[in-house]
Every structure is written in structure tokens, then in C-alpha cells.
Image (spheres, grey):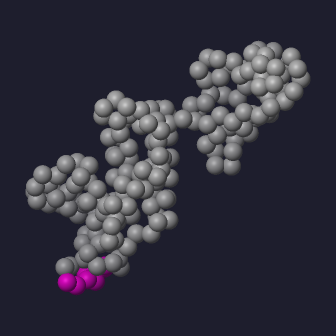
């Protein structure tokens, strides 16, 4: 994980990720030792109980893995699940997609990005990480999102994407009616059987 291995609290000062020691908040002594380390229930942070060898007091630190998105302009901003949900919600407008499903999609995207192990990720890779979970959630919303993300310029772009979806085992219900294998909402692309 990006925050490194847990310190054993041996005779060396505990060094944080950026190469600075963790100071005691009470006496400002630059040396502290880890007494106990535990992951939070979500697994996205480590809680460390520390002891200061100078004043003997104990304190707790929480180490969170940071993840930032690098925009095309070069600006860095913190990763935000809310931004994922907001962008995908626009693609899902008018579709039978619930807020819980959007929240789960955002969590899947974040998990996939964090699994890559990079603390900084280009914005276009975030978009790529959204595509597959969104396709599984609702293909109409997927086509809407992909058309903006991939900058579709003509009907041929949409046709090519629909052809690729069908070649991948996804079919659509007939316009005005439903196919015999269709169990999804009208107009929704569903896996073929």
C-alpha cells in the first residue's frame, strides 16, 4: 500500500512517507515510536498509537492514502467520489438507475484506481475507469458518457460503439417491443443468452 509498512517501534524514529519524522504534539520532540497500528474498518487508512520517548505521553495519528487527479491543464486536485457520481448522474438522466447504484459505481472506480498504486492519476484514466462499470450498470448511460468522453463526432461513432457492444455479447430490445430474451427495461442493452 502507498503508506508503506507499519513501523515496529524499534529504537529508530518513525519516519513518515515524505521523509520527515512524526513530532510529539505535546513537547515537539522529533522522535516518536509506534505502539500499535490498525487499519480502519474500510481499509483506507491506518490508525497508529504513538509514544513520545521524551515526555512519555501517547497520541494517535491517522495515515490516509492520498489520491489526486491531474487535470489536462496540469492542476492537481483531490480525487472525489462525488465528482464521479455527478458526472455519471448526468449520463443516467431519465434512466432507471438508483442513487445507491451510482454510489457503488463510484466506489468501484475508486477501488480500481487505488489498486493501481499510483498516488496521482491523469483525469483521462479516471474516465477510462468509469466506462466498464457504467456499461455494466446501464448501456444507454454508457453510450451517453462514452460519446462525450471519447468525443464522438458522428452517427458512425455511435454505430461503431453499438456494434462493438453487440459483438461483446450485448443486445438491445426491439424498438417498440421486447425480444423474447429481454428481461431489462425497454431500450436497454442486455447480455445475450
State whether residue 144 is above or below residue 129: below
In the drawing, does residue 169 fall left or right of residue 25? left
Main SS of the magenta segment? Answer: loop
Question: Which quarter of the image is occupied by the N terminus?
Answer: top right
Q: Position of residue 103 (x, y in %)?
A: 49, 59
Asked whether 75 or 88 is in front, the reply is 75
Q: Position of residue 99 (x, y in %)?
A: 47, 66
In the drawing, does residue 22 fall left or right of residue 67? right
State whether residue 54 is above or below residue 57: above
Give me the residue at 38% from left, 44% from top: 126
Question: Which quarter of the image is occupied by the C terminus?
Answer: bottom left
Give me the residue at 77% from left, 19% from top: 28
Q: Which residues are magenta?
A: 176-182
- Image quarter of residue 134: bottom left
Give me the residue at 69% from left, 41% from top: 39
Give me the residue at 25% from left, 60% from top: 143
Q: Residue furthest right?
A: 56
- Image quarter of residue 55: top right
- Image quarter of residue 48: top right
| Viewer can see residue 123 | yes
Q: Position of residue 34 (x, y in %)?
A: 78, 27
| Viewer can see residue 32 | no
In the drawing, does residue 111 fall left or right of residue 20? left
Q: Would you say residue 115 sits in the magenta stretch?
A: no
Q: Position of residue 120 (x, y in %)?
A: 44, 32
In the drawing, does residue 159 fall left or right of residue 1? left
State whether residue 147 is above or below residue 54: below
State whether residue 100 is above or below residue 56: below
Q: How many marks?
A: 0
Asked whether 61 or 164 is in front, the reply is 61
Amino acid at each position: 500500500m502507498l503508506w508503506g509498512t507499519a513501523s515496529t517501534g524499534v529504537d529508530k524514529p518513525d519516519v513518515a512517507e515524505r521523509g520527515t519524522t512524526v513530532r510529539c504534539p505535546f513537547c515537539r520532540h522529533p522522535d516518536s515510536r509506534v505502539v500499535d497500528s490498525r487499519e480502519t474498518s474500510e481499509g483506507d487508512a491506518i490508525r497508529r498509537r504513538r509514544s513520545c520517548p521524551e515526555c512519555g505521553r501517547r497520541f494517535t495519528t491517522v495515515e490516509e492514502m492520498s489520491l489526486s487527479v491531474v487535470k489536462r491543464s496540469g492542476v492537481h486536485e483531490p480525487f472525489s467520489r462525488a465528482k464521479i457520481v455527478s458526472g455519471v448522474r448526468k449520463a443516467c438522466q431519465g434512466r432507471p438507475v438508483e442513487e445507491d447504484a451510482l454510489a457503488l459505481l463510484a466506489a468501484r472506480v475508486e477501488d480500481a484506481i487505488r489498486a493501481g498504486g499510483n498516488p496521482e492519476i491523469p483525469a483521462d484514466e479516471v474516465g477510462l475507469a468509469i466506462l466498464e462499470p457504467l456499461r455494466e450498470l446501464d448501456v444507454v448511460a454508457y453510450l451517453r458518457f462514452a460519446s462525450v468522453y471519447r468525443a464522438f463526432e458522428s452517427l458512425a461513432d455511435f454505430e461503431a460503439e453499438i456494434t462493438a457492444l453487440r459483438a461483446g455479447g450485448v443486445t438491445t430490445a426491439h424498438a417498440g417491443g421486447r425480444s423474447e430474451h429481454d428481461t431489462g427495461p425497454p431500450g436497454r442493452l442486455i447480455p445475450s443468452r
